[in-house]
Image (tube, helix red, strand yellow):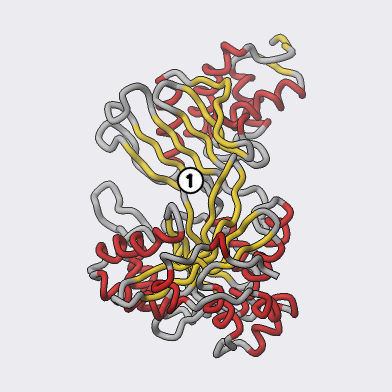
Amino acid sequence: MTASRAAPAEDLSDLLELVREDLVRSPGPVDVPRIARVLSRQGRVLGAAATLEVTAHIRDHIDGLGPLQGLVGPGVTDLLVNDDGSVWVDDADGLRPTTVHLTPAPARDLAVRLATAGGRRLDDAVPWADAHLPSGIRVHAVLPPLSPGGAILSLRLPSSESLDLAALAELGAVGQEARAVLLALVAARVPFLVTGGTGTGKSTLLAALLREAPPTERIVVVEDVLELAVDHPHVVHLQSRHANSEGAGAVDLTTLVRQSLRMRPDRIVLGECRGGEIRELLQALNTGHEGGCGTVHANTAADVPARLEALGALGGLDRGALAAQVSSALEVVVHLGRRGGVRRLEEIAVLHRDREGMLRATTALRAEEGGLREGPAATALSERLAREPRSSSPATQAMGPEAASSAARVPSAPSAASASASSASSSPRTGRRAA
């Protein structure tokens, strides 16, 4: 046997196959003893530093993201592999290309391996998969012929740290005035939706708000894929389950929302409303479960009613029935946007019914440079935040004086009831600045 300083790059693919075969014979972690044993069978010996380097490389290909592992870093939220093999990364600077390129065979192997690690089937018979890895990474993959070139991979990476409202304020996502309003929103147990487009930070803000809930409250989180990492002493997670290869065993969000009602929740949280489960959430929030919340994809706060109507239709609710349910179940919309790669709070709106009984979202506060600007529904929001929640005397005290008094700092403006009549002549840009 001869010692060498490093494993040649062209030998790593062969070594990778040998390690996989060794794992089949002897399951366990990919560690230095295993790599040394496999190398020994080849009649090769590496130095300590080289063995550690090779072990890390092999581990990335077997347990990690393989050729994409080096792209994972602070602030990276998405890794995207296109069918032409180009790889893009989304971070604080926005979406941008990288120098990494995958040929069709390695891209397919990576997609199949990650899907399998997430318990999903991915092959020619089922050429797409949506999986969740034990590390928290969310994987979506599509294989040819659905993609014209190679495999398409979309990876959503969990945040490396749990951000609170103070940290979001330091990053510029939430201003100090807005932070006080959001704290009051949680303290008053107002049911709300966090809305925005893809990648605007909805889950991050929702998790930051939930960590402000009193520690005496029990939070039940229902999600399709586990994404909400809530730093709170009493959080229970429920995750939906896809059907197996035989089409059996599926458990959807609607079922989980129903189950959550039997778990003595103080707050029911639907991680993302994407279908008919909105009906179950509305019914839950209309049966005394205050402080419930969730996220919804929407381009603007004004688009939220139309989005809810579309989701309600999937649950068998017409426009009138949905408006009646929402008007007493959900009250506030916290809308996020992304400009120039920066995620930030854009607007806080109040949900209400107009004179025709249809659902509307009217601006209460709009975030602008230097603070908040009033909208037509500012008075309605202020009055709601000042209202004492039914179960809140200890809860409000637990939130601290800043949250308890912030409702009084929300500026006055025409009420939401009169907003629909005066919307043609009123504009959030003409309101007074928040004090």
Question: Can the viewer see residue 326?
Answer: yes
User: Can you say which quadrant of the picture contains the N terminus?
Assistant: top right
Question: Can the viewer see residue 237?
Answer: no
Residue 432's quadrant in the figure?
bottom right
272 relative to 398, above or below: above
Counting from the top left corner in percent of width and height, residue 61 is at 55, 29
Towards the viewer: 116 or 284: 284
Counting from the top left corner in percent of width and height, residue 243 is at 30, 53
For image coordinates 66% across by 15% down, the residue present is 7
36 relative to 410, above or below: above
Q: Say left or right for 209 vs 377.
A: right
Other residues around mark 1 within 10 Å, as few (<14) / some (14–19) / many (≥20)? many
Callout 1, which amino acid?
Answer: Arg
Towards the viewer: 274 or 188: 188
Residue 222's quadrant in the figure?
bottom left
Residue lying furthest front in this view? Answer: 425
Counting from the top left corner in percent of width and height, residue 172 is at 69, 52
* Count of residue discs: 1
148 relative to 216, above or below: above
Q: Say left or right for 121 vs 364.
A: left
User: Can you say which quadrant of the picture contains the C terminus?
Assistant: bottom right
Q: Which residue is mark 1?
A: 138
Towards the viewer: 193 or 119: 193
For image coordinates 43% across by 67% down, the residue present is 423
For image coordinates 64% across by 19% down, the residue present is 40
Towards the viewer: 226 or 181: 181
72 relative to 304, above or below: above
For image coordinates 43% across by 52% down, the residue present is 299
Callout 1 secondary element:
strand
